[in-house]
Every structure is written in structure tokens, then in C-alpha cells.
């Protein structure tokens, strides 16, 4: 954990960051899910009015789950990073990758049910929902009533997507941040202000997130298909990574594994920049309210 931040401050800062990003980038995530789905050609291609309707379907469970998940992620990440740094055994990039991976495993366990509900809710036809006067989230939940454990069937898919993503993003983020700080220092422009810290964090995290998003797009496409099949898991019809990969390549070619990659890179770049910048700014501000000053080593 950071030297002058309490666990509650890290949890609160992570929650504020998560809420900010959820509401801003959620519509783009909905479009990405629809682009990557097996039914894109049947339901959305050539029908933009349907593609761009109901962009906030399924947001409620994400907001509820993201708060504890993001708090758990940052608490675990800060703790693991500090512990690994104190051992001074592993190279710093390896320590950052390992700390973020451990934190991601904890976060995914909390986030998986909401992610399954979210992606299935995003696929529901808004026109049908309006005619039936049904809520997208509640209608999706009803499909898991007979087997609620199926909501966790996407855990390995989510972890399989997020682990390589965070293992790529956080070392790049930490390195880019140090480069930007060093450049400001060399130019004699370092101010040490909260605004400067947030700006450097946003640029470094956004750039790292965009690169990591592009590189992990095939895993994200497979993860989307697995989660959209989660309702089939309730009827004991399961699809694994290998079979889904073969299906995508057979029906859409290798290009199918990269569907939505550009859109994912854009929203991840924006989301990562907002997420980590808001988190770092939030915990620095919370510490300053108690009269604490975070020094250089305490920054993310």
C-alpha cells in the first residue's frame, strides 16, 4: 500500500475512478460487444438504428460490481507492488506485471457475474424491450434463474482476457510515466502539482492501454463469445476456447478474431487514461485532506 494512503482511501479512489469511466465509455463498450457477437451480421449489420439503441443496457450491475472490484484491484495491486519492491528480487517491470496479475485475479472473481449479465443485456433488442415494458438487466437475470452459478462460467474467459492485458499495460504504463516525468525534469518543467501528476498518468496509462487493447483483441473477441454463450451454460451447453476460436476462423476468417479491435483500442485508451488519472488524483487529494503530502515514491 502507498505510504500515506489508507486502505479506505484506496478503495474510495478506485470506486470514484471506476464510476467515472463506466458512465463515460459504456456506450462504446456496448457497440464493441455487438460488433464482436456471433449475431452481428443478423441483428446489426445494415441496421444502424438498432446498433446504436439501448447503449446503456446492463449498466446497473456493472456499477454495483465495479465498486468493490476496482477497490479490491487497487488494494491488492498496491500491496503486492510494495511487497515485491521490498524483496528487491525481481526486476521492476516483472514486479509490476505480477502485482497487476494477482490483483486482476481477485477483481475478476467479483466482476464476472456482472460482466456476463452486462454483455447479454447489451445484445437485447431495444424495440422488443420497449414493447414488452421489460428491463434489460432483469430479463437477462431471469435466464439464469434455474442455474445462477452459470453467471461465474465466464471467469476463466474474463481472467484470460484481463491477465495478459494488465500484464502488458501496467509495465508499459509505469515505464512511460517515468519517461514523461524524466522529460519534464530534464526540461525544468516539473511542478509536482496534482494536475501535472494526473496529466502524466492519463497520457501514460492511455497510451499503454491502447497498445495492450490492440494486442489482446483476439482474446477479447473469444471472451465476448463465451460470455454470450453463458445462458447456454445454464442448459449444459458449453463452448470452450478452442471450439469458439475454430468457429470464428471457419465462419469469418482470421480477421474475425480482430473484430472491434480499433473501437476497443479507442475506448480502452480513453478509459485507461480517465481511470488511472482519476484514481491517482483521488487518492492524492484524499491524503491531502488529512494533511498528508505524498512524495515521489508514493505516486502510482
Image (spheres, helix red, strand yellow):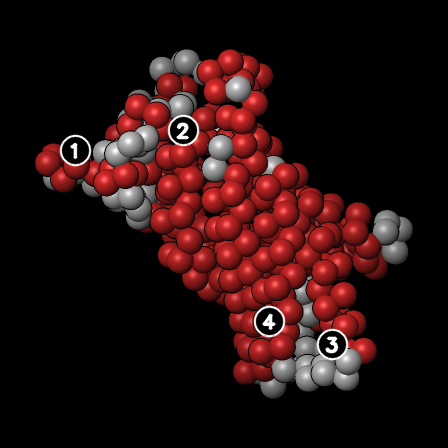
- Where is mark 2, residue-wise? 37
**Contact flag, marks 3 and 2 (Cβ < 8 Å):** no
Mark 2, Cα crowd under 10 Å, few <14 / some 14-19 / many 20+, is: many
Is residue 42 positioned above or below 64 on the image? above
Q: Where's residue 266, x and y in %? A: 51, 50
- Where is mark 1, residue-wise? 128
Q: Report helix, strand or loop for mark 1.
A: helix
Q: Quadrant of the N terminus?
A: bottom right
Instruction: Identify the residue shown where x is 71% and y is 64%.
Output: 177
- Where is mark 3, residue-wise? 184
Q: Where's residue 58, x and y in %? A: 32, 43
How far apart are the alpha carbons under marks 1 and 3? 54 Å
Q: Quadrant of residue 157?
A: top right
- Where is mark 4, residue-wise? 199
Q: Report helix, strand or loop for mark 3.
A: helix
Instruction: Identify the residue shown where x is 40% and y is 24%.
Output: 38
Instruction: Identify the residue shown where x is 73% and y is 56%.
Output: 81
How far apart are the alpha carbons under marks 4 and 3? 12 Å
In screen coordinates, is 62 left or right of 252? left
Q: Where's residue 115, x and y in %? A: 43, 39
- Nearer-N-terminus badge (3/2): 2
Q: Report helix, strand or loop for mark 2.
A: loop
- Nearer-N-terminus badge (1/4): 1
- Nearer-N-terminus badge (4/2): 2
Is residue 257 positioned above or below 247 on the image? below
How far apart are the alpha carbons under marks 4 and 2? 35 Å
Q: Report helix, strand or loop for mark 4.
A: helix
Q: Nearer the viewer, residue 27 or 119?
A: 27
How far apart are the alpha carbons under marks 1 and 4? 43 Å
Instruction: Identify the residue shown where x is 57% and y is 31%.
Output: 218
Q: Nearer the viewer, residue 181 or 97?
A: 181
Q: Nearer the viewer, residue 262 or 177?
A: 262
Amino acid at each position: 500500500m502507498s505510504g500515506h494512503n489508507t486502505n479506505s482511501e484506496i478503495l474510495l479512489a478506485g470506486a470514484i475512478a471506476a464510476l467515472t469511466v463506466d458512465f463515460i465509455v459504456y456506450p462504446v463498450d456496448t457497440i464493441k460487444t455487438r460488433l464482436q457477437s456471433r449475431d452481428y451480421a443478423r441483428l446489426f449489420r445494415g441496421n444502424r438504428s438498432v446498433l446504436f439503441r439501448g447503449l446503456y443496457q446492463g449498466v446497473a450491475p456493472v456499477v454495483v460490481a465495479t465498486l468493490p472490484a476496482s477497490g479490491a484491484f487497487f488494494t491488492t495491486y498496491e500491496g503486492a507492488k510494495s511487497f515485491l519492491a521490498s524483496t528487491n528480487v525481481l526486476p521492476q517491470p516483472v514486479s509490476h506485471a505480477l502485482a497487476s496479475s494477482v490483483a486482476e485475479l481477485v477483481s475478476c472473481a467479483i466482476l464476472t457475474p456482472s460482466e456476463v449479465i452486462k454483455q447479454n443485456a447489451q445484445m437485447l433488442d431495444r424495440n422488443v424491450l420497449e414493447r414488452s415494458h421489460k428491463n434489460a438487466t432483469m430479463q437477462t437475470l431471469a435466464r439464469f434463474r434455474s442455474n445462477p452459478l452459470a453467471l461465474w462460467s465466464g471467469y476463466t474467459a474474463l481472467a484470460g482476457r484481463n491477465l495478459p492485458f494488465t500484464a502488458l499495460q501496467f509495465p508499459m504504463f509505469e515505464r512511460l510515466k517515468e519517461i514523461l516525468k524524466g522529460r519534464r525534469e530534464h526540461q525544468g518543467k516539473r511542478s509536482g502539482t496534482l494536475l501535472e501528476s494526473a496529466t502524466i498518468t492519463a497520457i501514460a496509462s492511455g497510451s499503454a492501454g491502447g497498445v495492450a487493447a490492440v494486442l489482446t483483441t483476439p482474446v477479447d473477441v473469444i471472451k465476448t463469445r463465451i460470455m454470450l454463450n453463458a445462458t447456454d451454460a445454464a442448459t449444459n451447453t458449453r463452448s470452450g476456447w478452442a471450439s469458439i476460436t475454430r468457429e470464428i476462423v471457419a465462419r469469418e476468417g482470421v480477421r474475425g478474431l480482430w473484430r472491434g479491435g480499433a473501437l476497443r483500442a479507442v475506448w480502452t485508451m480513453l478509459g485507461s487514461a480517465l481511470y488511472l488519472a482519476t484514481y491517482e488524483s483521488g487518492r492524492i487529494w484524499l491524503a491531502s485532506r488529512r494533511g498528508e503530502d505524498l512524495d515521489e515514491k508514493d505516486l502510482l
